[in-house]
Image (spheres, rainbow, N blue to C red):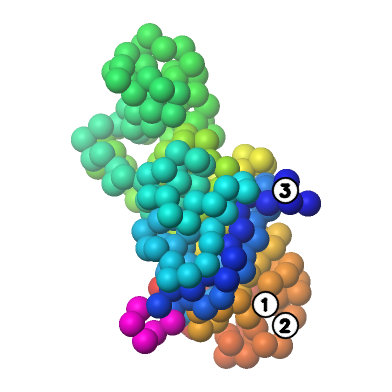
Amino acid sequence: MIDDVVLQTHALVRRFGGLVATRDVHLTVRRGARHALIGPNGAGKTTLVNLLTGVLAPSSGRIDLAGRDITALPAHQRVGLGLVRTFQINQLWPTITPLQSLALAVSSKQGASRRWWQALGDDARVASRCEVLLHQFRLDDVAGRRTAELPYGKRRLLEIALAVALEPQLLLLDEPAAGVPAAERADILATIAALPADVAVLLIEHDMDLVFSFATHMTVLVNGGVLTEGTPAQIAADPEVRAVYLGESLTGTRHAAGASHG
């Protein structure tokens, strides 16, 4: 169903001089999907995500968001239309609290950004939304602490909370568990699993345990192009995918071929 498609790329190409970093990529992400983008180092994942979010312009091809051509739109307009990447959220403000950060994001989304300082006490809608987000992302216990003082896992949760506060149609999670200590990973994993069901999520991640526990659909990128896509079971059993990953278990904790950016 076309109405179910939130993101679609058409023959997307990006060249850097003589290097073709992304070649004829056709990618479809459906509304409410839990979709993972995987591939070994140098596969073109970062380039593709930068094309989707407006950081890079394609050499050729088209990007549609909910049926609208966004290929030429700048990054901030894509965010306004509901394509939000955790990496694209402004750096966390270190001197203010998670509650204040969320109040800024929620107020901006609700058109009250010029009076955000009133949000905590005078705007019931903003205050209510912030309370829900703090609870959903397990930030209640640190809501009043300066962001700079938060454990790294809590800062990652705050980044995702800020993205969700912008009410995305499509949320791109770029390695949400990267660098998070083992003791704090459970909160990250549980929060990702509990993201709103109506929001499509495109997960870019090297941790295969996380990928296979989260995704219901997967796209494998190799040498800038789509090698294959399917369910996690289909991907795990695909001999070409296994060859790309050097024959190692795709559900290993940290796969050597995919343990660095690409």
Q: Nearer the viewer, mark 3 or mark 2?
A: 3
What's under tag 2, amino acid-wise? Answer: Asp
Specify whether 238 is left or right of 175: right
Residue at 41% of width from left, 22% of height from top?
111
- Residue 106's label in the rendered image is none
Q: Along the polypeptide, which appears first: circle 3 or circle 2?
A: 3
- The residue that disc 1 covers is 228
Q: What element carries label 3?
A: helix
Magenta region, residue range = 16-20
Q: Which of marks 1 and 2 is in front?
A: 1
What's under tag 1, amino acid-wise? Answer: Thr
Towards the viewer: 107 or 191? 107
- Residue 4's label in the rendered image is 3
Specify whether 117 is left or right of 9: left
Residue at 23% of width from left, 40% of height from top?
94
Structural crowding at the residue carrying mark 1, measured as other residues with C-alpha within 10 Å and reported as few (<14), some (14–19) or many (≥20): some
Specify whether 252 is left or right of 127: right
Which image quadrant is residue 227 in?
bottom right
Does the segment drawn in magenta span residue 19? yes
Q: Relative to residue 109, is residue 162 depicted above or below?
A: below
Does the segment drawn in magenta span residue 157? no
Contact flag, marks 1 and 2 (Cβ < 8 Å): yes
Image position, residue 249 (x, y; %): 63, 81
- The residue that disc 2 covers is 238
Specify whether 202 is left or right of 231: left
Which image quadrant is residue 141 in?
top left
What's under tag 3, amino acid-wise? Answer: Asp
